[in-house]
Image (cartoon, rainbow, N blue to C red):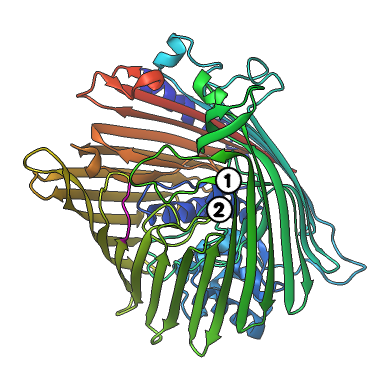
Amino acid sequence: MKKLIVISFLLLPAFAYAQTETNKPAEFDYYYDLISDLAEKNEEETDFNELADALFELWESPIDINNSQREEFSRLFWLTEFQANSLFNYVYLHKPLVTIYELALIPGFDTTLASSLKPFLAFENIITDNRNKVKRVKQTLLLRTGRVIENQVGYQEDKFEGNPWKTNLRYKFQVENKLTAGITLEKDAGEAFFKGSNKAGPDFYSGYLALNNISRFKNICIGHYTVGFGQGLLMGPGFAMGKSSQTVNTIQKETSIRPSSSTDENRYFQGLASTVVFSPLELTFFLSYKKRDANITETDSSGNVVQVSSLQNTGYHSIASEIADEKVLGEFTGGVRLAYNTPRIKTGISFVHSQFDAAIVPTPSNYNQFYFNGNQHSNLGIDYKILWGNALLFGEEAMDINGNAALINGITTNLSGRLQFLGVHRYYSKAYHSFYGNAFGENSRVQNEEGIYAGFKLVLIKHWTFSTYADFYHFPWLKDGVDAPSSGRDFLVQADYASGNPFSGYFQVRFKQKQKNQLSTDGIFNTLANTSANRFRVHLRYAVNNQFLLQTRVETNFVKTENTSALNGYMAYQDIRFTAQQWPLSVYLRYAVFDAEDYDARIYTFENDVLYAFTSYVCYKQGQRYYVMTKFALLDRLDFWIKYSQSVYPREQALSSGNYQINGNTRSDIRFQVIYSF
């Protein structure tokens, strides 16, 4: 009965707002389709904050396709370099374009890819002359809140400072593409609000003011912002495509400086940043100072922090130990980049320096002997992209202040009209360090890795696309849980079917082998054992009509470590999406079952969520999960989301542990969101 009441409540808007004229949720569906596709193609657990920022910014401020420069199209970061260049060249030769469907004629495009760009491109010519120029002012206010419904142990025992609601408020003001300003406030679950350690209000708040194309200033940003250079050896965006079924699209796009409205409480800069253009030269500089979370290990007689063991990146400040580590370490970061840009050659030299108020001294361990140790660090890097015939050569070469090197170089080309190729070689010294690096590789750190990657994408027959990659890598030094130099390999093959008819889908096979510790037979020391994972996925999509979309997935994961028994995991789900034709309403439903007997056999799956939020769910143990979400609009400016989800584990008596433990086998979540655009 409880479930029926909740579902009935979520479906109520279908009747309450049936007379609204607009159909904005249908437009949102293109956004959902794209973020779902990008998230699913990154098989591992990933932080999607940067992806959400980039997509929402594009959704709010679409690219004026007929009046944009080449670099603007790099904002469509899910396109390959070949596709982005083809798009710009086609527009340059055939503009003005008037409909999204013209893009299907471009080499490297099809109707599916063209449709995915719909909410991010504007086809109208909004500027006629200086006298008739339209000043377009947009404002957006977003409020989101949600919680775990069950009473977790930490709240029963008053371990948390605040209540279990997680709340986020964002405001954005924009005048055309010339000026943007924004404010972000966030309170995580369990954090105090106007009391305790947060007497001034929410735990996290940020803001920015950004100006674009003012005389020679390409951009000026004051407040919170992010920076990305080259291939990410010095400065990389928080989200990168990495290894995925987009096998020929691992190249970092030019992100440069972007204002940040993200709720990531550590991976941002705070201060001033700007790019000045002296064509074909560009000079970028940034200065930042902020306080970071860190684990304190030593203070002086006055209580000042003089040494920490590590940086904390969770952003949670709800219990005493987390609050003690909050914003205890001052960090100054500054950098400069000089770039030379022409249509065929882009190159730049970058320098970044970081300095901390206290020394970072990791707790000694065999594997972390080459981690950063000290209170200041510098990096120098050179990056390039060279268009040579039908090929693009790209790369970055970097060195830190201690002479440790990191190199990444590659080539991507269309071998024929149907076959694309990407090759990448990387070498990251075991002692190289960059605080904000985020480059292509197997490790989360740009450190201790060598590897070579080859990816292909082939359109062999009509409606069928075949994608594959092979990646071989080696770790020259120890890792956490791996007590010797080790190696691994990774293979993926995927076949996609897409046509003009209602049916589409794909089949994916992935094999991954790495080495990890295994206790020797005499039980005295660790040896290395090969661990292999074989994953199989079938995903089917069927558009019944303009209102109903069905999606079905079955996925298995077979894991085997030498001298041990095999571990198995499986997951299957059924999605139903309903989009009303006359009403501004969409409804999303999912029912999933899963069984992964060990965490190594877990399966990741992406869920649709309220706009600008992500849920990447881990299927582990035996259970079932369902959710229902509705999107609806009131008038033409006010949009609402409500989502209810529940996971049930029939074999468990308690879920999670510590303060987050739920005494029972069920976890339920509720989330609300409203966006007012004016």
Place of residue 269 in the rendered image (x, y in percent of width and height, measured from the top left): 66, 47
Depth check, mark 1 against mark 2: the one in front is 2
Q: Residue at x 6, y 42 (%)?
A: 521
Task: Give SS at disc 2.
Answer: loop
Residue at the extreme top of the image, as rendered: 157
Callout 1 environment at 10 Å: few (<14), some (14 to 19), or many (20+)? some
- Give the residue at mark 2: 436
Q: Which residue is situated farthest in the bottom direction here? A: 389
Disc number for residue 267: 1
Q: Is residue 478 magenta?
A: yes
Three-letter amino acid code at disc 1?
Arg
Q: Residue at 83% of width from left, 69% of height from top?
A: 216
The residue located at (86%, 67%) in the rendering is 215
**Mark 2: which amino acid?**
Tyr
Q: Of callouts 1 and 2, which one flags the residue occurring earlier in the amino acid sequence?
A: 1
Measured from the top left, where is residue 408 in percent x and y?
46, 70
In which quadrant of the rendered image does the C terminus lie?
A: top right
Q: Up-down: is 547 above or below 146? A: below
Q: What is the x, y in percent for residue 394?
A: 51, 76
Residue range corresponding to the magenta coloring: 475-479
Question: Residue 634 or 353: which is nearer the viewer?
Answer: 353
Residue 125 visible in the current orientation: yes
Q: Few, some or many C-alpha atoms within 10 Å of disc 2 (few <14, some 14-19, many ≥20)? A: many
Q: How many marks?
A: 2
Q: Are marks 1 and 2 in contact (CB under 8 Å)?
A: yes
User: Dot 1: what SS?
Assistant: loop
- In the image: residue 100, left or right of residue 333: left
Horizontal side of 270 relative to 265 (left or right) equals right
Side (left or right) of 135 relative to 262: right
**Is 630 drawn above or below residue 478 in the view shown?**
above
